[in-house]
Image: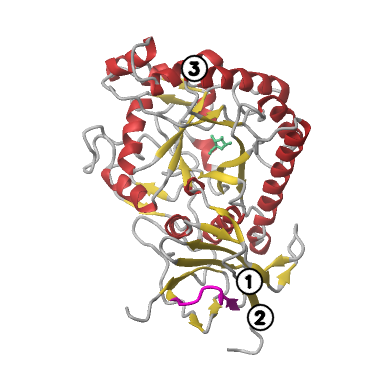
């Protein structure tokens, strides 16, 4: 090892438990936007399409990711959506002007089709209701349509549409980004708080078993953040279970060191929302803890100009089709690490989105489905990030970036899967020029041996994948070693690492 290589030390101990991870932090999102639905998940003429018109190749990739929950149908789309347009005989469904993204919504796919698709890919659905142009009535009717078994107008309507069994949707979002001037039916915090409260009250009367997400700020950059949270929660605290957080980052000025430090902002966001929730809890003398649903997060900036060039009112045009590069995958890994370390409060999260629209999975209409660079850190977290989140004690060299000081080169989260007797260390080396020598004390895990050291690395931070060539993909030759409870690994410059250990028994 070269004498100039910097060193980072980490202590991992079984006893340093943050919380049991709710698997739903590895959720994602499908909105009626761009080609997410039409020629994304749904393309009846595709060679792999099933009897409902859903692409088999896309279903396969979604299954590979093991997505526990998928938010639907928006996003900004939901704030102008009439759910009734998307149910019943397909030939009777209206085509509507879709105002959020200025396209035409054909309503070929609606609630029932999406529920069937979600079941096929093994995901729960987080359903959003329209609190933009609509309100209490449409929300309680949709819930009755989805969850009531039978014997009422909307449940029998569902049955008449061929869905005898209720969908039993447990998680519901009370609107989307209601603080944003771009939102159809934007509200002031008081208007939203009142409407969300009354909607929640009626929905709980229809089905007391549901969980509800109160709408938080659209990003840390909103002028009303965090006052929005304080005012709206004052209304919704006792009827909601979660508050939403949304955040996207981009490397617009080409400063990669600063870009990779953006997780510091995400950290600040989570801490501020948590503190605001706890302030309202104290103010109300409540016993209840409010949890966080980070139900939109990702990198998003590559496609911004292209989106202004779409044909208005077309069906499923290419919108928000960011082509992700290697450094985007590193930041996505960092964002996952941040949420795992906040597993005590962040109980749901959705990588926005899943197919074609700012997505890990891309499709060619009539052609191939392929994996973007960000597919991989998301896959690794979803596969190996299940269990108990442990607090790693990190001692890392640091750097100063444009917007952040004292940014540790090493970012890390640790997950102990007690049932499988597995320990996974997620480690991001943000140093763009040099490797980092990691020494990790895992002595409290007696008998644990190295299984593999997965690495995502690339000489070119701007390398991208295409349908024809996967330039950015992981390998398992990271070279970590574990002896006498000490793990050593050289983390390549600018790399995402997944170091997996498992308990072994001498007689095996
Ligand atoms: O995910 C894309 C858009 O970003 C969503 O529709 C909206 O909620 C957010 O602004």
Residue at horizontal 35%, vertical 28%? 109
The label nearer to you, 1 versus 3, is 3
Q: Visible in this render: residue 435?
A: no
* Residue, far top: 153
Q: Quadrant of the C terminus?
A: bottom left
Which residue is under mark 2? 6
**What's the CA distance linking mark 2 and mark 1?**
10 Å
Q: Which secondary structure, mark 3?
A: helix
Q: Is residue 57 above or below residue 260?
A: above
Stretch in magenta: 435-449
Q: Position of residue 265 (x, y in %)?
A: 69, 52
- The mark nearer the N terminus, 2 or 1, is 2
Q: Is residue 302 above or below residue 421?
A: above
Q: Quadrant of the N terminus?
A: bottom right
Query: Considering only vertical position in the picture, is 207 above or below 318?
Result: above
Q: How far across and down, in percent of the image, does residue 7 sit?
A: 65, 80
Which is closer to the viewer, label 2 or label 1?
2
Q: Is residue 309 visible?
A: yes
Q: CA distance from mark 1 to mark 3?
A: 51 Å
> What residue is pinned by disc 1?
431
Left or right, residue 36 beside residue 297: left
Tell whether 41 sits left or right of 101: left
- In front here: 341 or 507? 507
Residue 283, image quadrant: top right
Does residue 173 appear to the left or right of 51 in the view shown? right
Q: Is mark 1 within 8 Å of ligand 1?
A: no
Residue at (59, 34) in percent of width and height: 241
Rendered image: mark on residue 140:
3
Q: Which label's residue is closer to the chain start, 1 or 3?
A: 3
Q: Can you give x and y, in whole percent of width and height, for residue 39 in the image?
A: 34, 38
Is label 2 in contact with label 1 (beta carbons under 8 Å)? yes
């Amino acid at each position: 090892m070269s004498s100039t290589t910097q060193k980072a030390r980490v202590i991992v101990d079984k006893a340093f438990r943050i919380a049991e991870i709710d698997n739903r932090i590895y959720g994602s999102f499908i909105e009626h936007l761009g080609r997410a639905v039409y020629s994304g998940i749904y393309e009846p003429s595709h060679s792999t399409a099933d009897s409902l018109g859903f692409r088999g190749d896309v279903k396969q990739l979604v299954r590979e990711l093991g997505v526990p929950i998928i938010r639907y149908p928006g996003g900004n789309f939901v704030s102008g959506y009439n759910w009734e347009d998307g149910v019943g005989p397909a030939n009777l469904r209206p085509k509507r002007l879709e105002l959020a993204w200025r396209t035409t919504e054909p309503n070929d796919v609606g609630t029932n089709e999406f529920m069937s698709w979600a079941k096929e890919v093994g995901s729960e659905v987080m359903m959003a209701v329209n609190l933009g142009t609509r309100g209490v009535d449409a929300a309680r009717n949709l819930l009755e349509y989805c969850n009531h078994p039978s014997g009422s107008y909307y449940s029998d309507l569902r049955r008449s549409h061929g869905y005898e069994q209720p969908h039993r949707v447990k998680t519901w979002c009370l609107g989307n980004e209601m603080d944003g001037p771009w939102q159809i039916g934007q509200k002031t915090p008081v208007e939203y708080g009142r409407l969300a409260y009354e909607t929640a009250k009626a929905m709980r009367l229809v089905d007391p078993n549901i969980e509800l997400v109160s709408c938080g700020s659209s990003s840390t950059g909103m002028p009303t953040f965090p006052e929005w949270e304080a005012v709206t929660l004052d209304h919704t605290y006792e009827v909601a279970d979660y508050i939403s957080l949304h955040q996207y980052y981009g490397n617009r000025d080409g400063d990669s060191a600063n870009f990779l430090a953006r997780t510091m902002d995400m950290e600040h966001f989570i801490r501020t929302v948590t503190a605001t929730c706890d302030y309202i809890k104290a103010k109300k003398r409540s016993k209840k803890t409010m949890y966080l649903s980070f139900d939109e997060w990702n990198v998003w900036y590559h496609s911004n100009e292209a989106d202004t060039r779409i044909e208005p009112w077309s069906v499923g045009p290419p919108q928000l089709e960011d082509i992700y590069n290697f450094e985007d995958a590193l930041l996505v890994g960092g964002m996952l690490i941040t949420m795992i370390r906040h597993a005590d409060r962040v109980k749901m999260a959705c990588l926005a989105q899943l197919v074609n629209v700012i997505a890990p999975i891309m499709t060619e209409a009539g052609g191939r489905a392929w994996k973007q660079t960000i597919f991989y850190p998301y896959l690794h977290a979803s596969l190996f990030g299940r269990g108990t989140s442990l607090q790693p004690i990190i001692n890392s060299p640091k750097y100063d970036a444009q917007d952040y000081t004292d940014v540790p080169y090493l970012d890390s989260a640790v997950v102990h899967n007690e049932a499988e007797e597995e320990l996974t260390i997620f480690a991001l080396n943000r140093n763009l020029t040099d490797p980092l020598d990691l020494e990790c004390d895992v002595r409290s895990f007696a008998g644990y041996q190295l299984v593999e050291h997965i690495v995502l690395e690339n000489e070119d931070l701007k390398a991208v994948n295409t349908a024809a060539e996967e330039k950015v993909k992981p390998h398992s030759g990271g070279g970590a070693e574990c002896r006498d409870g000490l793990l050593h690994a050289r983390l390549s410059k600018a790399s995402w690492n997944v170091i997996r250990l498992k308990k072994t028994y001498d007689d095996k």
